[in-house]
Amino acid sequence: MRSTSEKPSQSQRMRLNNPMKRPEIVAKVQATRDARGYREKMRQLLGQRHAVGQMRRLSPITAEERTALSARMRMNNPMHRPEIAAKPQTPERRAASSLRMKESWRLGKITTRRHGRAPNKSEARLATVLGPIGFRYVGDGTHWIARTPSGIRRNPDFIHRSARRRVAFLLHGAYYHRDPGLLRAEIDDYRATGWRVLIFWATNHVAQWHLPIILQTVLTWLGGSESPLSAQGQIQQFTISSVTRTITSWPLES
């Protein structure tokens, strides 16, 4: 039996202090939702999605079906086969598997985990100033540059909606993108495929006061990138380290 002097745990305090455990709060929330028509709106939205095939109704699975499904999964699990489980994970096997994975990735047979990923805080802030001037966020894997000299598919953070421009915007963290060889290969890939790329290097999160400076820089760069010489891929790099100082061509000379 617990001593009366023992303090409740954090999870117990959270359950005790949860306002949705109080009937009067639950009734108030439900009344507000009903007054605003949330249930009817959700019913209409789900009905529309069902009508166009975006959702499908699934019949509930019974306990017997769940048991049978679990048994089939255990039976088909290769690690339950002695001849598979007995194979040692040697460095040679891991290296061969890594090569197969890399080749599958290069051929586009593997779907990136980034597909559908929501923008982070810095990318979301940039979208507020880049969206109105024609850029859209594709850093979730919705746009890839597949045929590159290095064989690595490139996924920019933002691209211009105009296909004629072939303009991309990259937001690179100075800590995670500091390998000179990888940076040079990335720049060469964009150049070779005819993309004009504006790279912003962030030493920290993009702050609200960065946005007017970034917007003016992008507008100035877009105006200059319309020259005849810009038919070849061009790279311009900036990093903002303070309100008044903008350093160009860092950390690589373009």
Image: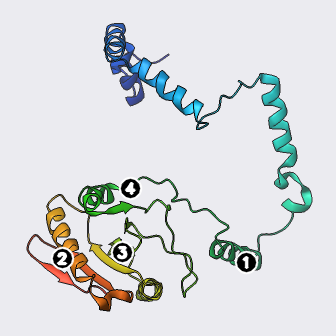
Q: Nearer the viewer, mark 3 or mark 1?
A: 3
Instruction: Report the mark closest to the observer, 3 or 4.
Output: 3
Residue 75 appears at what percent x and percent y? 88, 45
Q: Amino acid at mark 1?
A: Pro
Measure the alpha-carbon separation of dots 3 and 4.
Answer: 19 Å
- Looking at the rendered structure, the secondary structure element under dot 2 is helix
Q: Nearer the viewer, residue 152 or 193?
A: 193
The mark that comes first in sequence, 3 or 4, is: 4
Q: Is residue 188 above or below residue 115?
A: below
3D distance between C-alphas at marks 3 and 2: 14 Å
Q: Which residue is mark 2?
A: 220
Q: Are the residues tagged 2 and 4 within 8 Å (C-beta)?
A: no
Dividing the picture into quadrants, the one containing residue 179 is bottom left
Q: Dot 4 corresponds to which residue?
A: 119
* Mark sitting earlier along the chain (2/1): 1
Determine which of the numbered discs, if any, sits on residue 233 in the image.
Answer: none
Mark 1 lies on a secondary structure that is helix
Query: How far is mark 3 from mark 1, CA to CA?
Result: 42 Å
Disc nearer the start of the sequence (1/4): 1
Nearest to viewer (mark 2 / mark 1): 2
> Looking at the image, is mark 3 or mark 1 earlier in the sequence?
1
Please name the amino acid that badge 3 sits on. Answer: Val
Q: Residue at x 40, y 22 (%)?
A: 15
Mark 2 vs mark 4: in front: 2
| Residue farthest toward the right in the current orientation of the protein | 83
In the picture of the structure, the residue carrying the numbered disc 3 is 167
Vertical placement of residue 118 versus 27, above or below: below
> Which residue is located at x 42 percent, y 52 percent?
118
Residue under label 1, please give it.
91
Judge the density around disc 4: few (<14), some (14-19), many (≥20) Cα neighbours within 10 Å.
some
